[in-house]
Each structure stands twice: as C-alpha cells, then as structure tokens.
Amino acid sequence: MRRENRPPHPFQKARRVTPDLHLSQFDYELPEELIAQFPAQRRDASRLLHLTRGGDLHDRQFKDLRSLLRRGDLLVFNNTRVIKARLLGRKLSGGKVEVLIERVTGAHTALAHVKASKSPKPGGVLRLADAFDATVDGREDSLFALTFPAPVLDLLEQYGSTPLPPYITHAPSQDDDERYQTVYAEQPGAVAAPTAGLHFDQAMLERLAADGVQEAFVTLHVGAGTFQPVRVQNLNEHVMHKEYFHVPGDVIRKIHATREAGGRVIAVGTTSVRALESAAAMNPQPGRDCRGDTRLFITPGYVYAWVDALITNFHLPQSTLLMLVSALAGQEAIRRAYTHATRQRYRFFSYGDAMFIESSQEKP
C-alpha cells in the first residue's frame, strides 16, 4: 500500500491531554453476564440507547435509527474488511506458536504478534497451520516482521481464523465469519471489526438512502491495539497504538457540503471518528485524499472538527474508546448513560447493543 511522503501531522505526535484526567475517571462496574457472546438474531435487532445533545436518555431499538436521522445528514462508514488474521503453528524446535497478524505490509510480508514460550529469533522459521513456513525477519517494537511464501491475504483466507475479541469466549465459527463483518466491508486489512457497522443490513442502508440520508466510506484498518488496556494512570503518559487510515477526497468534499447545508456528519463507529478527525488535522483541500498512520488520542477537552454525532457500541472500562465518546458527549453524560445501560441490561461490546450519541460541543 503506497504511502505519501509528507511530514508528520499533529495527530501523529503525542497530544497532551487535560492535566487532571486520570485512568480511574473512566472506570465502571460491568456484570460479566452483560458481555454479549453472540450477535443478535438479526443485524438490526439490537437495542439503541439515544443520548441527546442535552444529555437526555431514551431507550429505543436500532431499527428506530431512521427516526433520529434527517434528510441531508451524512453517515460515514468504515469499509475496512476483517481478515482471518489468527494462525496456529510451531517453531522448528517444536514449541507452539500463535500468530496474530497486525498489519499486512506487502504482498508477502506482515507485522504480527507472536505468542510463544520463547520469542523467535530473526531468521527463525514458523510452521503455520501445518501447511506453510513463514520466516522471521526481525522486530519492530513488540511486533515481528514475517515473510510468507505466497500472498499473505490468500494464505490467511485459506488457513487463518477470524480474530474474535479476547472477551468472546467461544471459538470462531462460520457464523462469526459472516457476522463479525459489516455488509459493506471492502478493503481487507483489519484484525478487529468496526463493530457499530455490524447493526446495518442492506435493507436498512437502502431505506436510509430513500429517506435522503447520504452515505460515505472511509477506511481505517483496526488493529489489535484497540483491545489493549491503558496501563498508566496519567493519560499524558499513554502511547496510542498506530493504525492506517484513508479518507478519499470526494468524502471530504461531501463533508464540507453537508456542513454548509446545515446537515450533520454522523460517524458510524469510533474508527470512522479516528479516520475523520485525523484527516481534519491535516487541513486538506476538498477533493484531496488524506491517508497515513494515525495515533490520534481523543480525550475530554478535544474539540471535534468534523463529527457531529456518533453511532457506536458500548466500550470497555478504562479504554481509549470510552475516553473518545466522553469527549464528544461529556464525561458526566457518558457516566450516566453507562449506569443506565447496565441497569437496563443492555448487551455490551462487539456483539452488543448500540448508542446514538449527539455531540454536546458547538460546531466549529
């Protein structure tokens, strides 16, 4: 995938967050039985908690989303496609290994997390799926650079398994291969689904288009880092994981036109938020593509440039995604919403229910 030679942009550098923000402020109690282990029977059959701009809460069904959107609104979806990124195998010494591809870097190369009793050395060979050998070329921080004997994506499709999140306890099945993937997935490269999009089926997309709601597609290849816990109390010390994004120029043109006409830009999922706000930080001209790697860390105090509302699932305690939604709606409003959701027995995380969050911020 081609990268443009540009200097680093503001979102690629560590952004100092508000000094009084600490990890403990983003914790909440979640009964384990509320973690959804399987998706709803139908994609649009989940519940939807509506958090208004004024902080009011309304219990709805996801199919009610149509009534919350207006003609001229722009829904922005992440069209990344989840790859079958998990492979099991052995080192030539016989030790077991588990490989989770983090990023495909070329036709035959990738960066990966490798679990083994002892880390493999450069030049080492991993026998994967009892079918082919991958060579360890070296390391980039915590990731291993691997070379494969055939196109990576082809081998993963044939021998890999869907990388379900760590809080889902069952082994992936054919049902997961379908349901842990959006109906509009197009660009292969993610190792985790943009889960807010899992609620949309083709019929709903067609109904929204008939209602005059516009759509646009960006790409952000979700990495396994999205599940990594924040390990520091002072959020200024947190190092955000890196993910590749692409916002096409025609999408940027649509965003400007929507806002000028008084419509809302509504991100479908936090990954769409990260793509949009990373592009906005580049201050692009309408019609010019934005692409690159982002480490954008959104916490309360961040002023959103393009996003007016968000469709999202419920997020892990103390996660960067919980911080992101708190920046959009306000910490107290999100705290009340999550307390309400647990009391009303909403289903949480990737296969769970959804929220529709209206921004509490004034448009810039």
Image (tube, rainbow, N blue to C red):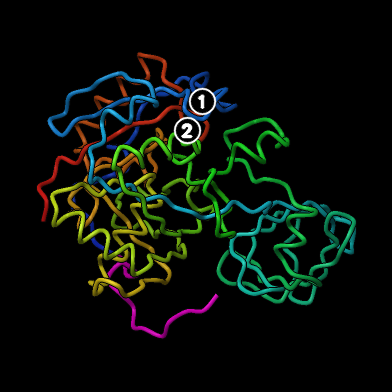
Contact check, label 2 and label 1, Cβ < 8 Å: yes
Query: Which of 78/71 is in front?
Result: 71
Range of the magenta residues? 1-14
Q: Residue at the location (36% across, 83% down)? A: 6
Mark 2 and mark 1 lie on one chain; the one further toward the N terminus is 1
Dot 1 alpha-carbon crowd within 10 angstroms: few under 14, some 14 to 19, many 20 or more:
some
Point out residue 75 in the picture as x, y percentages from the top left corner: 33, 47
| Quarter where residue 217 is shown | bottom left
* Distance of label 2 from label 1 (alpha carbons): 6 Å
Q: Residue furthest front?
A: 210
Q: Is residue 74 left or right of residue 268?
A: left
Q: Residue at the location (79% across, 68% down)? A: 134
Mark 1 falls on what kind of element?
loop
Magenta highlight on residue 300: no
Amino acid tagged 1: Ile
Q: Is residue 192 left or right of residue 160?
A: left
From the image, tell me which residue sits under label 2.
Answer: 349
- Which mark is drawn over residue 1? none
Amino acid tagged 2: Phe
Q: Residue at the location (82% across, 54% down)? A: 89
Q: Is residue 173 left or right of residue 335?
A: right
Query: Which of 265/20 is in front?
Result: 265
Please, is residue 278 above or below residue 76 in the view?
below
- Which mark is drawn over residue 35? 1
